[in-house]
Image (cartoon, helix red, strand yellow):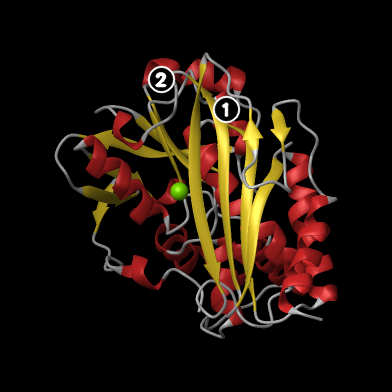
Amino acid sequence: MSGLSEFSLIKQYFEKYTVARDDVLLGIGDDCAIVQNKTDQQIAISVDTLVEGIHFSPDADPESLGHKSLAVSLSDLAAMGATPAWFTLALTLPAVDLRWLAAFAKGLANLATQHKIALIGGDTTRGPLSITVQVHGFVDAKQALRRDGAKEGDNIYVSGTLGDAGAGLKLKQSQLNNISGTDTDLMFLQQRLDKPTPRVELGQQLLDIAHSAIDISDGLVADLNHILEKSNLGAQINLEALPISNELLSITGREQAEILALYSGDDYELCFTVRPEKENQLLKNIKENYTKIGMITGGDKTIFTKSGQKIELTGAGYEHFSTEG
Ligand SMILES: [Mg+2]
């Protein structure tokens, strides 16, 4: 089979998974896709590339990889409070492996269907395995949750639990010592690493409530730092408040879990800041799990406390090691 026909085959492969949307006037198959804008809304756009050997290992399960490729970009839309609409996919493949493609497309399509996001175009080339997904979402004019919106006195919250995906990665790389826990605990952590849940609905619900938000891809400290830098502020984090899953707790114990929660990435939970007066609105409107972990302060430092005592941590600079590989 010639290279060209192989790759037109791939195109056909993904075409059948496209979610139907009224605002897609022309989807896959022409030089460009044509979509219908909404006049009262703005468009949030984000792109992410996953490269074999850097972001995932060569033996990665293709269905999980399909899920994760879209999930990490949906997580960026979530962090802005945007509603997913369309995405494009650029796939570089060393060879055409139909079983791999079927599983990859299934993982991608299941998540796309769940969030009603339509695949409207893409490109395939031959080369080392790499996956690029660009997402587009709608957000009400000037309502997006930005990193520069935090205010002194805001409470800081995170969704879900932290450190699970980081522990899953370290387990895979045999970098966790003195671990206990059951096989079910281990599988939970692996699942959190391989199939992250983008907090899309939570992001939308936070639109009128939060001052700022970010998704946790590089680790809580690193990502919160982006909010602090953009907002010119500091933070105080209570270590005993960090939400840790029972599974992680039973595997590593509390102290190691706290370090993972602070410095390891890939959880794709949201970190957001809310003014104390809006706490009732938060309680009333948000059904998903979230935890108050500290507050935004003046200055430019992040201070960690435990049982009211200041704690020095030596995890800084860890963000460069947070990606897989
Ligand atoms: Mg992000």
Q: Which mark is residue 295?
A: none
Q: Quadrant of the N terminus?
A: bottom right
8 sits left or right of 88 in the view = right
Give the amino acid at mark 2. Lys
Q: Residue at x 42, y 59 (%)?
A: 218
Q: Please give the residue where the numbered disc 1 appears in the rendered image.
A: 204
Nearer-N-terminus badge (2/1): 2
Q: Position of residue 208 (x, y in %)?
A: 48, 18
**Which corner quadrant of the image does residue 129 belong to?**
bottom right
217 sits left or right of 205 in the view = left
**Which corner quadrant of the image does residue 150 belong to?**
top left
Give the amino acid at mark 1. Gln
Name the mark nearer the viewer: 2 or 1: 2
Q: Which mark is residue 142?
A: 2
Q: Residue at x 41, y 58 (%)?
A: 262
Q: Position of residue 67 (x, y in %)?
A: 70, 57
| Disc 2 residue: CB within 8 Å of ligand 1 | no
Q: Residue at x 52, y 62 (%)?
A: 49
**Which corner quadrant of the image does residue 213 belong to?**
top left
61 sits left or right of 283 in the view = right
Q: Position of residue 23 (x, y in %)?
A: 70, 26
Most foreground residue, 229 or 37: 37
